[in-house]
Image (cartoon, helix red, strand yellow):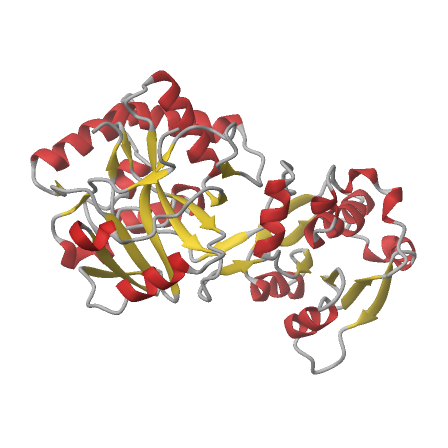
Protein backbone atom coordinates (compact mmCIF):
# COMPACT_ATOMS: atom_id res chain seq x y z
CA UNK A 1 0.00 0.00 0.00
CA UNK A 2 1.33 3.44 -0.92
CA UNK A 3 2.38 5.99 1.68
CA UNK A 4 -0.53 7.76 3.33
CA UNK A 5 1.08 11.21 3.21
CA UNK A 6 4.00 12.51 1.16
CA UNK A 7 5.66 15.85 0.44
CA UNK A 8 4.66 17.56 -2.80
CA UNK A 9 5.61 20.34 -5.18
CA UNK A 10 3.33 23.13 -4.09
CA UNK A 11 2.14 26.06 -6.14
CA UNK A 12 2.21 29.45 -4.44
CA UNK A 13 1.57 33.12 -5.08
CA UNK A 14 4.73 34.79 -6.40
CA UNK A 15 4.10 38.01 -4.45
CA UNK A 16 4.32 36.57 -0.96
CA UNK A 17 4.34 40.02 0.63
CA UNK A 18 0.71 40.47 -0.51
CA UNK A 19 -0.51 37.15 0.89
CA UNK A 20 -2.97 38.77 3.29
CA UNK A 21 -4.87 40.12 0.29
CA UNK A 22 -4.77 36.82 -1.61
CA UNK A 23 -5.92 34.16 0.89
CA UNK A 24 -9.37 33.38 2.29
CA UNK A 25 -11.15 30.89 4.57
CA UNK A 26 -12.54 27.62 3.13
CA UNK A 27 -15.45 27.87 0.69
CA UNK A 28 -18.05 26.48 3.09
CA UNK A 29 -17.73 29.29 5.66
CA UNK A 30 -17.89 32.13 3.11
CA UNK A 31 -21.28 33.71 2.52
CA UNK A 32 -22.08 36.13 -0.31
CA UNK A 33 -21.02 39.20 1.65
CA UNK A 34 -17.72 37.63 2.72
CA UNK A 35 -17.02 36.50 -0.84
CA UNK A 36 -17.55 40.02 -2.11
CA UNK A 37 -15.22 41.35 0.60
CA UNK A 38 -12.40 38.95 -0.24
CA UNK A 39 -12.89 39.37 -3.99
CA UNK A 40 -12.55 43.14 -3.60
CA UNK A 41 -9.19 42.78 -1.86
CA UNK A 42 -7.39 41.67 -5.01
CA UNK A 43 -8.14 40.48 -8.53
CA UNK A 44 -6.13 37.34 -7.73
CA UNK A 45 -7.68 36.50 -4.36
CA UNK A 46 -8.28 32.74 -4.17
CA UNK A 47 -12.07 33.20 -3.88
CA UNK A 48 -12.20 34.15 -7.56
CA UNK A 49 -11.43 30.54 -8.50
CA UNK A 50 -12.52 28.74 -5.30
CA UNK A 51 -16.02 30.27 -5.44
CA UNK A 52 -16.16 31.34 -9.10
CA UNK A 53 -18.72 33.71 -10.54
CA UNK A 54 -18.83 33.36 -14.31
CA UNK A 55 -19.96 36.05 -16.76
CA UNK A 56 -23.66 35.89 -17.75
CA UNK A 57 -24.53 32.64 -19.55
CA UNK A 58 -21.03 31.32 -18.82
CA UNK A 59 -19.97 28.12 -17.03
CA UNK A 60 -18.49 29.21 -13.73
CA UNK A 61 -16.42 26.06 -13.33
CA UNK A 62 -14.88 26.37 -16.80
CA UNK A 63 -14.28 30.04 -16.09
CA UNK A 64 -12.37 29.11 -12.92
CA UNK A 65 -10.18 26.73 -14.90
CA UNK A 66 -9.47 29.39 -17.51
CA UNK A 67 -8.73 31.99 -14.85
CA UNK A 68 -6.33 29.68 -13.04
CA UNK A 69 -4.51 28.95 -16.32
CA UNK A 70 -4.22 32.69 -16.96
CA UNK A 71 -2.75 33.26 -13.49
CA UNK A 72 -0.13 30.60 -14.19
CA UNK A 73 0.71 31.99 -17.61
CA UNK A 74 0.99 35.49 -16.14
CA UNK A 75 3.33 34.40 -13.36
CA UNK A 76 0.85 35.06 -10.56
CA UNK A 77 1.38 31.48 -9.34
CA UNK A 78 4.72 29.66 -9.34
CA UNK A 79 5.45 25.97 -8.77
CA UNK A 80 8.15 24.90 -6.33
CA UNK A 81 10.95 22.96 -8.01
CA UNK A 82 11.34 20.29 -5.32
CA UNK A 83 8.89 18.45 -3.06
CA UNK A 84 8.39 19.95 0.37
CA UNK A 85 6.25 19.75 3.47
CA UNK A 86 4.72 23.14 4.26
CA UNK A 87 4.46 24.06 7.94
CA UNK A 88 1.97 26.70 9.07
CA UNK A 89 1.42 28.47 12.36
CA UNK A 90 -2.04 30.02 12.51
CA UNK A 91 -2.29 31.88 15.77
CA UNK A 92 -1.09 29.32 18.32
CA UNK A 93 -1.91 26.26 16.19
CA UNK A 94 0.81 24.44 14.26
CA UNK A 95 0.44 21.92 11.45
CA UNK A 96 1.81 20.80 8.11
CA UNK A 97 0.45 20.71 4.56
CA UNK A 98 1.06 17.37 2.84
CA UNK A 99 -0.32 15.33 -0.05
CA UNK A 100 -2.77 12.76 1.35
CA UNK A 101 -3.80 9.56 -0.42
CA UNK A 102 -7.28 10.08 -1.89
CA UNK A 103 -8.39 6.52 -1.19
CA UNK A 104 -11.74 6.99 0.54
CA UNK A 105 -12.53 5.58 3.96
CA UNK A 106 -12.40 1.89 3.05
CA UNK A 107 -8.82 1.24 4.19
CA UNK A 108 -9.60 3.02 7.49
CA UNK A 109 -6.37 5.03 7.28
CA UNK A 110 -8.49 8.20 7.12
CA UNK A 111 -11.45 8.22 9.51
CA UNK A 112 -14.50 10.50 9.28
CA UNK A 113 -16.91 11.65 11.96
CA UNK A 114 -19.45 13.49 9.82
CA UNK A 115 -22.17 12.63 7.31
CA UNK A 116 -21.87 14.35 3.94
CA UNK A 117 -24.41 15.56 1.39
CA UNK A 118 -24.58 15.15 -2.37
CA UNK A 119 -24.97 18.84 -3.30
CA UNK A 120 -21.66 20.18 -1.96
CA UNK A 121 -19.78 17.17 -3.35
CA UNK A 122 -21.24 17.70 -6.84
CA UNK A 123 -20.20 21.36 -6.70
CA UNK A 124 -16.63 20.62 -5.58
CA UNK A 125 -16.25 17.78 -8.10
CA UNK A 126 -17.26 20.04 -10.98
CA UNK A 127 -14.69 22.60 -9.84
CA UNK A 128 -11.99 19.94 -9.41
CA UNK A 129 -12.60 18.57 -12.89
CA UNK A 130 -12.33 22.07 -14.36
CA UNK A 131 -9.24 23.24 -12.45
CA UNK A 132 -7.47 19.91 -11.79
CA UNK A 133 -6.06 21.61 -8.72
CA UNK A 134 -6.57 21.40 -4.96
CA UNK A 135 -7.42 25.04 -4.28
CA UNK A 136 -8.06 24.49 -0.59
CA UNK A 137 -7.08 22.02 2.06
CA UNK A 138 -8.59 19.34 4.22
CA UNK A 139 -7.88 19.51 7.95
CA UNK A 140 -6.91 16.30 9.76
CA UNK A 141 -5.66 15.37 13.21
CA UNK A 142 -2.85 12.94 13.96
CA UNK A 143 -2.99 11.17 17.35
CA UNK A 144 0.79 11.71 17.58
CA UNK A 145 1.04 9.61 20.73
CA UNK A 146 4.82 9.92 20.96
CA UNK A 147 4.71 13.67 20.35
CA UNK A 148 7.19 13.45 17.45
CA UNK A 149 5.08 15.56 15.09
CA UNK A 150 4.35 18.19 17.73
CA UNK A 151 8.06 18.49 18.54
CA UNK A 152 9.15 18.66 14.89
CA UNK A 153 6.62 21.39 14.12
CA UNK A 154 7.73 23.39 17.14
CA UNK A 155 11.37 23.14 16.02
CA UNK A 156 10.54 24.42 12.52
CA UNK A 157 8.59 27.32 14.04
CA UNK A 158 11.70 28.52 15.86
CA UNK A 159 13.24 29.89 12.68
CA UNK A 160 12.20 32.91 10.66
CA UNK A 161 9.19 32.19 8.43
CA UNK A 162 9.47 31.97 4.66
CA UNK A 163 6.21 33.92 4.39
CA UNK A 164 3.69 35.56 6.69
CA UNK A 165 0.15 36.86 6.41
CA UNK A 166 -2.96 37.66 8.39
CA UNK A 167 -6.50 36.36 7.91
CA UNK A 168 -9.48 37.64 9.89
CA UNK A 169 -7.17 39.08 12.53
CA UNK A 170 -5.17 35.87 13.03
CA UNK A 171 -1.43 35.93 12.29
CA UNK A 172 -0.10 33.27 9.92
CA UNK A 173 3.50 32.13 9.52
CA UNK A 174 4.65 29.70 6.84
CA UNK A 175 7.79 27.56 6.36
CA UNK A 176 9.05 25.18 3.69
CA UNK A 177 10.62 21.94 4.94
CA UNK A 178 12.77 20.38 2.21
CA UNK A 179 16.10 18.79 1.32
CA UNK A 180 17.98 17.38 4.34
CA UNK A 181 15.50 18.83 6.83
CA UNK A 182 12.69 16.96 5.10
CA UNK A 183 14.46 13.59 5.35
CA UNK A 184 14.31 13.77 9.14
CA UNK A 185 10.81 15.23 9.42
CA UNK A 186 8.23 12.78 10.93
CA UNK A 187 5.39 12.86 8.43
CA UNK A 188 2.04 11.90 10.04
CA UNK A 189 1.15 8.22 10.06
CA UNK A 190 -2.10 6.22 9.91
CA UNK A 191 -4.72 6.59 11.17
CA UNK A 192 -5.57 10.24 10.57
CA UNK A 193 -8.88 11.72 11.66
CA UNK A 194 -10.93 14.22 9.67
CA UNK A 195 -11.51 17.52 11.43
CA UNK A 196 -12.81 19.59 8.50
CA UNK A 197 -13.20 18.81 4.82
CA UNK A 198 -15.25 15.61 4.65
CA UNK A 199 -16.96 16.75 1.43
CA UNK A 200 -13.62 17.72 -0.14
CA UNK A 201 -12.01 14.41 0.75
CA UNK A 202 -14.86 12.34 -0.65
CA UNK A 203 -14.82 14.53 -3.75
CA UNK A 204 -11.07 14.03 -4.19
CA UNK A 205 -11.49 10.27 -3.76
CA UNK A 206 -14.25 10.23 -6.39
CA UNK A 207 -12.04 12.23 -8.76
CA UNK A 208 -9.13 9.84 -8.17
CA UNK A 209 -11.40 6.93 -9.14
CA UNK A 210 -12.05 8.51 -12.54
CA UNK A 211 -8.52 9.92 -12.94
CA UNK A 212 -5.93 7.61 -11.32
CA UNK A 213 -3.13 10.16 -11.82
CA UNK A 214 -4.95 12.45 -9.37
CA UNK A 215 -4.61 10.06 -6.46
CA UNK A 216 -3.73 12.59 -3.74
CA UNK A 217 -5.28 15.65 -2.15
CA UNK A 218 -3.95 18.67 -0.25
CA UNK A 219 -4.26 18.18 3.50
CA UNK A 220 -3.26 20.15 6.59
CA UNK A 221 -2.41 17.87 9.52
CA UNK A 222 -2.07 19.00 13.14
CA UNK A 223 -1.03 17.01 16.17
CA UNK A 224 -3.86 16.17 18.54
CA UNK A 225 -1.39 17.12 21.30
CA UNK A 226 -1.01 20.67 19.97
CA UNK A 227 -1.89 23.12 22.77
CA UNK A 228 -3.08 25.58 20.10
CA UNK A 229 -5.77 23.20 18.85
CA UNK A 230 -9.18 24.77 19.53
CA UNK A 231 -12.56 23.04 19.15
CA UNK A 232 -15.58 25.25 19.70
CA UNK A 233 -19.15 24.11 20.26
CA UNK A 234 -21.81 25.06 17.73
CA UNK A 235 -24.73 26.61 19.58
CA UNK A 236 -28.32 26.22 18.40
CA UNK A 237 -30.63 29.15 17.60
CA UNK A 238 -34.34 28.35 17.30
CA UNK A 239 -36.26 30.97 15.36
CA UNK A 240 -40.05 30.97 15.38
CA UNK A 241 -43.01 33.00 16.56
CA UNK A 242 -44.37 30.38 18.93
CA UNK A 243 -41.35 29.37 21.01
CA UNK A 244 -42.55 27.66 24.21
CA UNK A 245 -39.78 26.90 26.69
CA UNK A 246 -42.33 26.64 29.48
CA UNK A 247 -44.09 23.82 27.60
CA UNK A 248 -41.07 21.53 27.75
CA UNK A 249 -39.74 22.31 31.24
CA UNK A 250 -41.79 19.53 32.92
CA UNK A 251 -40.28 16.91 30.58
CA UNK A 252 -36.81 18.34 31.11
CA UNK A 253 -37.18 18.01 34.88
CA UNK A 254 -37.38 14.22 34.55
CA UNK A 255 -33.94 14.16 32.95
CA UNK A 256 -32.09 17.27 34.10
CA UNK A 257 -31.37 19.29 37.19
CA UNK A 258 -32.59 22.79 36.30
CA UNK A 259 -31.36 26.06 37.77
CA UNK A 260 -31.34 29.66 36.53
CA UNK A 261 -28.00 31.33 35.91
CA UNK A 262 -27.26 33.26 39.15
CA UNK A 263 -27.38 37.06 38.87
CA UNK A 264 -24.06 38.61 37.95
CA UNK A 265 -22.53 35.30 36.83
CA UNK A 266 -21.15 34.99 33.29
CA UNK A 267 -23.44 32.50 31.47
CA UNK A 268 -20.62 30.91 29.48
CA UNK A 269 -18.48 30.38 32.58
CA UNK A 270 -21.53 29.01 34.39
CA UNK A 271 -22.15 26.50 31.60
CA UNK A 272 -18.52 25.41 31.63
CA UNK A 273 -18.67 24.78 35.37
CA UNK A 274 -22.04 23.04 35.12
CA UNK A 275 -20.73 20.63 32.50
CA UNK A 276 -17.46 19.86 34.22
CA UNK A 277 -18.42 16.25 34.97
CA UNK A 278 -21.74 15.70 33.18
CA UNK A 279 -23.75 16.74 30.14
CA UNK A 280 -25.04 20.29 30.45
CA UNK A 281 -26.46 23.07 28.33
CA UNK A 282 -27.87 26.55 28.79
CA UNK A 283 -31.22 27.69 27.37
CA UNK A 284 -31.57 31.44 26.87
CA UNK A 285 -35.15 32.54 26.19
CA UNK A 286 -36.39 35.67 24.44
CA UNK A 287 -38.05 36.72 27.70
CA UNK A 288 -34.61 37.07 29.30
CA UNK A 289 -34.54 33.83 31.28
CA UNK A 290 -31.29 31.85 31.23
CA UNK A 291 -31.73 28.31 32.46
CA UNK A 292 -28.94 25.82 33.13
CA UNK A 293 -29.68 22.13 32.54
CA UNK A 294 -27.40 19.39 33.94
CA UNK A 295 -28.16 15.76 33.15
CA UNK A 296 -29.15 13.71 36.19
CA UNK A 297 -26.84 10.78 36.97
CA UNK A 298 -29.80 8.37 36.86
CA UNK A 299 -31.39 9.75 33.68
CA UNK A 300 -32.89 6.88 31.66
CA UNK A 301 -31.11 7.46 28.34
CA UNK A 302 -31.95 3.96 27.10
CA UNK A 303 -35.48 5.26 26.57
CA UNK A 304 -34.14 7.39 23.67
CA UNK A 305 -32.88 5.08 20.89
CA UNK A 306 -32.39 8.03 18.51
CA UNK A 307 -29.52 9.34 20.64
CA UNK A 308 -27.14 7.44 18.38
CA UNK A 309 -26.09 4.01 17.19
CA UNK A 310 -22.80 3.71 19.08
CA UNK A 311 -21.89 4.29 22.70
CA UNK A 312 -19.38 6.91 21.49
CA UNK A 313 -22.13 9.05 19.96
CA UNK A 314 -24.59 8.45 22.78
CA UNK A 315 -21.99 9.85 25.20
CA UNK A 316 -21.70 13.17 23.36
CA UNK A 317 -23.17 16.28 24.91
CA UNK A 318 -24.27 17.47 21.47
CA UNK A 319 -26.17 14.23 20.76
CA UNK A 320 -27.92 14.32 24.12
CA UNK A 321 -28.78 18.02 23.97
CA UNK A 322 -29.98 17.73 20.38
CA UNK A 323 -32.31 14.83 21.27
CA UNK A 324 -33.45 15.81 24.76
CA UNK A 325 -33.52 19.62 24.57
CA UNK A 326 -33.49 20.99 21.02
CA UNK A 327 -35.93 18.59 19.36
CA UNK A 328 -38.57 18.99 22.11
CA UNK A 329 -38.25 22.76 21.74
CA UNK A 330 -38.79 22.50 18.00
CA UNK A 331 -41.87 20.32 18.52
CA UNK A 332 -43.28 22.73 21.10
CA UNK A 333 -43.17 25.70 18.72
CA UNK A 334 -46.64 26.72 17.63
CA UNK A 335 -45.29 28.06 14.33
CA UNK A 336 -42.89 26.44 11.89
CA UNK A 337 -39.51 27.00 13.57
CA UNK A 338 -36.14 27.19 11.88
CA UNK A 339 -32.82 26.11 13.30
CA UNK A 340 -29.62 28.12 12.89
CA UNK A 341 -26.12 27.69 14.28
CA UNK A 342 -23.27 29.82 15.59
CA UNK A 343 -19.93 29.06 17.22
CA UNK A 344 -20.04 32.45 18.97
CA UNK A 345 -21.63 32.12 22.42
CA UNK A 346 -22.00 35.89 22.80
CA UNK A 347 -23.80 36.09 19.47
CA UNK A 348 -26.18 33.34 20.61
CA UNK A 349 -26.93 35.11 23.89
CA UNK A 350 -27.43 38.42 22.12
CA UNK A 351 -29.85 36.81 19.67
CA UNK A 352 -31.97 35.60 22.58
CA UNK A 353 -31.71 38.95 24.37
CA UNK A 354 -33.04 40.73 21.26
CA UNK A 355 -35.94 38.29 21.11
CA UNK A 356 -34.79 36.87 17.80
CA UNK A 357 -34.41 33.28 18.98
CA UNK A 358 -34.27 30.79 21.79
CA UNK A 359 -30.59 29.95 22.14
CA UNK A 360 -29.26 26.58 23.34
CA UNK A 361 -25.60 26.81 24.31
CA UNK A 362 -23.33 23.78 24.60
CA UNK A 363 -19.88 22.92 25.85
CA UNK A 364 -17.32 21.81 23.23
CA UNK A 365 -16.80 18.26 22.03
CA UNK A 366 -13.36 16.96 23.05
CA UNK A 367 -10.84 15.71 20.49
CA UNK A 368 -10.75 12.26 22.08
CA UNK A 369 -14.53 12.05 21.57
CA UNK A 370 -14.08 12.83 17.87
CA UNK A 371 -11.58 9.97 17.68
CA UNK A 372 -13.91 7.58 19.54
CA UNK A 373 -16.81 8.26 17.17
CA UNK A 374 -14.59 7.81 14.12
CA UNK A 375 -13.08 4.61 15.55
CA UNK A 376 -16.62 3.28 16.02
CA UNK A 377 -17.37 4.02 12.33
CA UNK A 378 -20.20 6.26 13.46
CA UNK A 379 -21.03 9.90 12.70
CA UNK A 380 -21.84 12.82 14.95
CA UNK A 381 -24.98 14.95 14.74
CA UNK A 382 -24.68 17.86 12.30
CA UNK A 383 -22.70 20.86 13.54
CA UNK A 384 -21.03 19.01 16.40
CA UNK A 385 -17.61 20.62 16.12
CA UNK A 386 -16.10 23.88 14.97
CA UNK A 387 -12.33 23.76 14.66
CA UNK A 388 -10.99 27.29 14.92
CA UNK A 389 -9.52 29.09 13.17
CA UNK A 390 -10.40 27.65 9.77
CA UNK A 391 -7.45 26.56 7.64
CA UNK A 392 -6.78 29.28 5.05
CA UNK A 393 -7.11 28.67 1.33
CA UNK A 394 -4.50 30.06 -1.04
CA UNK A 395 -1.31 29.69 1.03
CA UNK A 396 -0.31 26.70 -1.08
CA UNK A 397 -2.12 24.98 -3.93
CA UNK A 398 -1.56 21.49 -5.28
CA UNK A 399 -1.98 20.56 -8.96
CA UNK A 400 -3.65 17.15 -8.99
CA UNK A 401 -1.34 15.51 -11.50
CA UNK A 402 2.42 15.46 -11.21
In the displayed structure image, the side of residue 263 where residue 96 appears, left or right? left
Q: Nearer the viewer, residue 163 or 152?
A: 152
Q: Residue at x 78, y 38 (%)?
A: 306
Q: Return the residue found at the far bottom.
A: 264
Residue 342, position as x, y percentages in the image: 56, 54
User: Residue 305 is drawn in which quadrant?
Assistant: top right
Residue 18, position as x, y percentages in the image: 17, 56
Residue 133, position as x, y percentages in the image: 27, 32
Q: Nearer the viewer, residue 337 or 204?
A: 204
In the displayed structure image, the side of residue 209 where residue 337 appears, left or right? right
**Is any part of residue 56 visible from this angle?**
no
Q: Nearer the viewer, residue 45 or 402?
A: 402
Q: Return the residue found at the far left.
A: 74
Q: Quadrant of the C terminus?
A: top left
User: Residue 255 is drawn in which quadrant?
Assistant: bottom right
Q: Residue at x 70, y 46 (%)?
A: 312
In the displayed structure image, the side of residue 33 where residue 240 appears, left or right? right
Residue 126, position as x, y percentages in the image: 36, 24
In the displayed structure image, the side of residue 206 where residue 253 appears, left or right? right
Compared to residue 151, the image places residue 314 above or below, namely: above
Amino acid sequence: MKELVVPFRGERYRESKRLSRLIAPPYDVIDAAARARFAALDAHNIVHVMLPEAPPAGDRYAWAGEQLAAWREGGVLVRDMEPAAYVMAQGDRLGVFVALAAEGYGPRRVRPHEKTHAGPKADRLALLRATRTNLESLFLLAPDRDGALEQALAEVAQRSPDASAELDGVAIRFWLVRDKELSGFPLPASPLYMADGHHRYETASAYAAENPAADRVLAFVASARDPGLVVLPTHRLIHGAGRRVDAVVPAWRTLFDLAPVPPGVDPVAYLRQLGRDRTACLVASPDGDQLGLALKPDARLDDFPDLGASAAVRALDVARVETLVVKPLLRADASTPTLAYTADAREALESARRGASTAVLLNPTRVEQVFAVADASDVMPPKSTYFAPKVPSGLVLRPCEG
